[in-house]
Amino acid sequence: MLVLASNSPRRRQLISLGGWEYTLIPTETDESTIPDECAEDYVRRLAEVKAHTACRMISPEHLPGSLVIGADTAVVSEGDVLGKPADAEDARRMLHHLRGRMHQVFTAVAVLNPEVDELTGAMCVTDVPMRDYSDEEVQEYIASGDPFDKAGAYAIQHPVFRPVRDLHGCYANVMGMPLCHLTRLLARYAIRPRVEIAQACQATIDYSCPVFHRILSGEME
């Protein structure tokens, strides 16, 4: 049994593309950073915390044979982690800061096998070049309400705002779940997608991915 420890509708959408059957256990996690904690350690820690938290919510009779998936995503600019905006002014500040610049999106995926207390993980990092959107576009996007539950105050897949230009990495990672990395982790347990995962991902998000072959083969982390 796969268990997804997540509140994110985007992660649910993405993991559903693989045809895996899973149970959803939403978790509440303190997303505060620790002093001097780098972005990679931050997302890895939160992904593992989410997996362990969800594991404690599974009834004991269902623990054998279960795998719990936790994931966390951070928008990182010049070493600073940008979380979800507190309000409209915070969203405006983040979007102005990111405008016309390159930043990175880090996602850590943790897979916990509670039966043997085994934790495996993967890390995906994508360079994200933002376009030079206008102040008016920022205002309209904030008014839509979309930025407020998203790290960095934006969604790459937003059909109107479309803040990102010329991406050359994993698009699903920027949405919150790098599916090829998850596929590799689950393959260790002989759990495979029921479809060609890269093709399903690209068709759904309308993106020609230049890196999926290298990720699935293990050539690229």
Image: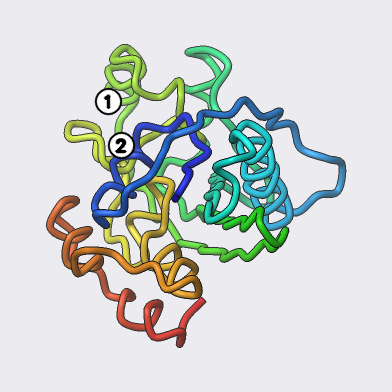
**Looking at the image, residue 215 lies above or below residue 83:** below
Q: Does residue 23 appear anywhere in the picture? A: yes
Lateral position of residue 211 relative to residue 94, left or right: left
Residue 137, disc:
1
Lateral position of residue 185 relative to residue 215, left or right: right
**Looking at the image, residue 98 lies above or below residue 105:** above
**Which residue does the image show at 66% across and 29% down from the upper left?**
29
The furthest residue to the front: 61
* Residue type at numbered disc 2: Tyr
Q: Nearer the viewer, residue 3 or 204?
A: 3
Residue 133, disc:
2
Q: Does residue 96 appear anywhere in the picture? A: no
**Looking at the image, residue 16 lies above or below residue 190:** above
Q: Nearer the viewer, residue 14 or 85?
A: 14
Residue 33, disc:
none
**Which residue does the image show at 31% across and 41% down from the upper left?**
163
Picture quadrant of residue 113: bottom right
Q: Nearer the viewer, residue 81 or 33?
A: 33
Q: Nearer the viewer, residue 70 or 105?
A: 70
**Which residue does the image show at 46% across and 84% down from the upper left?**
218
Secondary element under disc 1, as helix, strand or loop, is: helix
